Each structure stands twice: as structure tokens, then as C-alpha cells.
Image (cartoon, grey):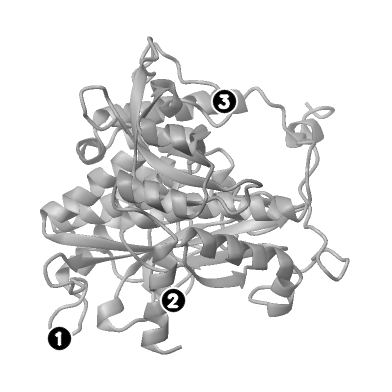
Amino acid sequence: MSKKKRAELREAIADRRGAADAAAARDWVAERGIEELECLVPDQAGVARGKIMPAQKFFQSPTMNMPSSIFHQTIAGGYADEDAPGGGDPADSDLVLQPDFSTLSVVPWASDPTGQIIHDAFHRDGRPVEVSPRALLRRVSDLFENKGWSPVVAPEIEFYLVKPNTDPDYPLEPPIGRSGRPETGRQSYSISAVNEFDELFEDIYDFSEAQGLEIDTLIHEEGAAQMEINLRHGAPLALADQVFLFKRTIREAALKHSMYATFMAKPIANQPGSAMHIHQSVRDAKTGRNIFSDDQGKPSPEFFAFLAGTQKYMPTVMTLLAPYVNSYRRLTRHSSAPINVQWGYDNRTTGIRVPPSGPEARRVENRVPSSDANPYLAIAATLACGYLGMVEGLTPSEPIDGSAYGLDYDLPRGLLEAVSAFEDCGPLQSVFGRTFVQTFAAIKRAEFETFMRVISPWEREYLLLNV
């Protein structure tokens, strides 16, 4: 495709998404005959909370109120202990949600003409809500901007297609493709295995195009009916918004074809887990030059400092990169997932990979985050690690040649260990703010307590008659 054609395509996609202000949004909605608007706010799990209202009513008063508890809810629907630090507002007072008109798009799977728009959360005095995931990512991005830097990210999201499963006591299974048979072996990068679900992926592409979302590539991953979608690089908040919307899109498209799409980190035993790899680089805000390369095109001191910060601080942000008990089932030895913070050039066994590239595309790929992570928080966390490395002038270890799978664990092995490391890191407290750290930790501990109430098949298998 020529540069001109590519530019025309990107302009057409951009026209499907976003408005400059309320007046432009009103015109955009009227032109498309939109009858309802889904007013969305991503919570700590990356779940879409909000309200649906008639478009006419929305423009009469585009701000809305929702209780502060939406940012304190666990994935199980409960809440953190109000008496614990970070437990939330005992009065559950209202927050003010204001639309970000740049995120306006259609909801292509809706039966009636419907639009969607992501909102930001504010206190009544106008302050951003400290525990809002979008606000946290903005906070981290601002740290870069204050240094004259512009971070750039490109996420890769893995997920499984599975048969509908209405009984959680039964294991998940691959769905039936067009051949009438489920996958049994691993079909990494297989075109024919992707073609098994052609109609589903045609809908995903159509839904994405209608929303102005750009898919870079689609591949079949290692697991049975495991797929990966890569997004084009861009600004952190814009890419986090895209991942947030892509997850919704993929789930909706799968349901249309009588399947589930799951972003669980480890949904099926004896199959690889699902990751959200995040490629990162940093540009000079004035010139647009990639500061990871020096004037001779070689790796710069900033590049190595970013790497070193990722090595040093990634174990302390693991609760954001691997936020659930299930997440740590993926991060086990010889399971196609990293277990340490080693780095290497074009080495997929390390937690931190430097892909082959020219000087302008030099970047760092963080391979640790799980696909179950909230994209806003995961991107904020991995950028924060690199930022701290740059401002502290850190030096990384030597790169790894060969496999890093046999080396020692550097990362927490479980959720509670990760939460404690998160709380105990002083530099992260200054980056994220104490309020967010306490709130997220309280939510994770509450989720762990609900997990502990469930008796697993392993316990029934090995303890029932043997102890």
C-alpha cells in the first residue's frame, strides 16, 4: 500500500472516532442518527462501568454522577474493607464524570443506533480522582512530558476462544471451527487455524473499523484457539483506550458466534497463558526523535537507564501487571512466559526483550504483563519503571544469551507477595500517589479473601482421602 493510500485510510478511520468538543459531538451524533449513548468509565479491573442514556438527554447535561465506590469494587462484585487504608469513602459520595469527546464512537454490535464515550472522573472541587485508572496513566505520562519526553507504546493482546461455559466447575474447551472439529494440537502462526474462525474475525475487523480502531496484525498463538492482536503504536492514553474498547469488541464478536473470548491469564491447564506485551519507546517532545538512539544510531544512555529501571522496579509493580491469583499460574518455569527481569536482544525467554529494529524504532518490549491486566494500569506501571530508571540514571545487567527460563525467579510468585512489594516501594508511592497504592492493595486483598473461600479440584484430588 502506498503512503498516500495509507494516509487516506488512517484519515478515514480517524473520521469515525472522536469529536473536538460538545458541539462537534452533537453534530457527529446527529449525522449518524445515534439514539442512545453508552457513557463509560473503566474501573480498576478495566471493566466498563457507567450509564446508558438517550442522546438528546446526554447533550442537555453531558456530565453525570456515579458513586465513588465504582473505583473500589473487586472483580467479584464486592468491596474493600472500608476500615482499612484505601477502603474508600464510607459515605460513598458521588463523583463527577465528564466525557472525553475524543473517544466518541459507535457501538457497532448494538441493535439500535448507539454511541459510546469514555469519561474521566473528578471530585466535586474539580480535582481528578486519584484512583481512576485513566487519571493514573495521565499522571505518569505527565512525568515524562515535564522532562520534555513523549512516551510511545504498542500493546499486543493475547486471548483464547472457548466453548460457552456456564458451569465454572468444568474446564474450558476450544470451540468448534468451520471444519466441525476443535483444535487439539498447538498451531502457532497457522493461517489455516485462523481461517477456522474467519467469520468471527471478519466481524472483529468490521466492528473495529466502525469504531476507528486500528489493528496492525492478527496471528494464531501457541495455545489451542489462542489468538493475538497487535495494535499500532501511539500515545499511552490513546492506546489504553483502544485496548479497553478492543476487549469489549472481541467479547461481543465472539458471543455473536456462540463462543466466549477470554482474557484470563491462564484459562486452560497445560496450555500457554495469555500476555499483554507492551512495546515502549520515548521521543523528544520537540523534535520527535527517539531518545533511545544517539546521534550515531547506537543505543543511548537513556535507553539503558530505561531498561535498568524496568529491571529494578518491575517486581514492585507486579500486582498491576498480574492482578489476580490466576495471573501467577501463567508465570511459571518453561511455560512460554518469563519468570525474571533479565533482558536480551531479540530474546523471547526474558522478561524484557529488545526487538530487532533501526535506530528510530528502537524500543523495549515488556513481556511480563498478563492479558487480564487493566491496560491503563499496566501501561502506567511499565512506563513508571522506565521513568524511574531514567531519572535515577540506573545501569542494567548484562543481556542474556540463550534461554532465561532456567534462571532464578525475580518476580513475585503470588498475589499477596506482589501486593506487599507494591506497598513497600517508596519511589512508586511518589509516582502513583499513596491514595492509589492503598486503594489498589485493599482491593487485591479483598479479592484474595474471596478466592480463599473456594475449594479447588486439586485439594479434593490430593487431600480428600490422603491426609
Q: What residue type is labelled 1?
A: Gln
| Residue contact between numbered discs 3 and 1, judged by CB atoms under 8 Å | no
Q: Picture quarter containing residue 393?
A: bottom left
Give the percent coordinates (x, y) of residue 137: 30, 46
Q: In which quarter of the image is the C terminus?
A: top right
- Dot 1 falls on a residue whose secondary structure is loop
Instruction: Name the residue furthest right.
Output: 180
Q: What residue type is labelled 3?
A: Gly
Give the percent coordinates (x, y) of residue 314: 35, 50
Give the percent coordinates (x, y) of residue 76: 59, 28
Query: Which comes sooner in the sequence, label 2 or label 3?
Result: 2
Question: Marks 2 and 3, how far apart in space?
Answer: 41 Å
Instruction: Tell whether 217 sits left or right of 98.
Output: right
Q: Can residue 386 be seen in this view?
A: yes
Question: Marks 2 and 1, how far apart in space?
Answer: 34 Å
Q: Picture quarter containing residue 67?
A: top left
- Dot 3 falls on a residue whose secondary structure is loop
Instruction: Tell whether 284 sits left or right of 78.
Output: left
Residue that carries the numbered disc 2 in the rendered image: 9
> For residue 2, which numbered disc appears in the image?
none
- Dot 2 falls on a residue whose secondary structure is helix
The residue that appears at 52% across and 34% down in the rendered structure is 52
Residue that carries the numbered disc 3 in the rendered image: 77
Question: Marks 3 and 1, how far apart in space?
Answer: 54 Å
The residue that appears at 59% across and 42% down in the rendered structure is 326
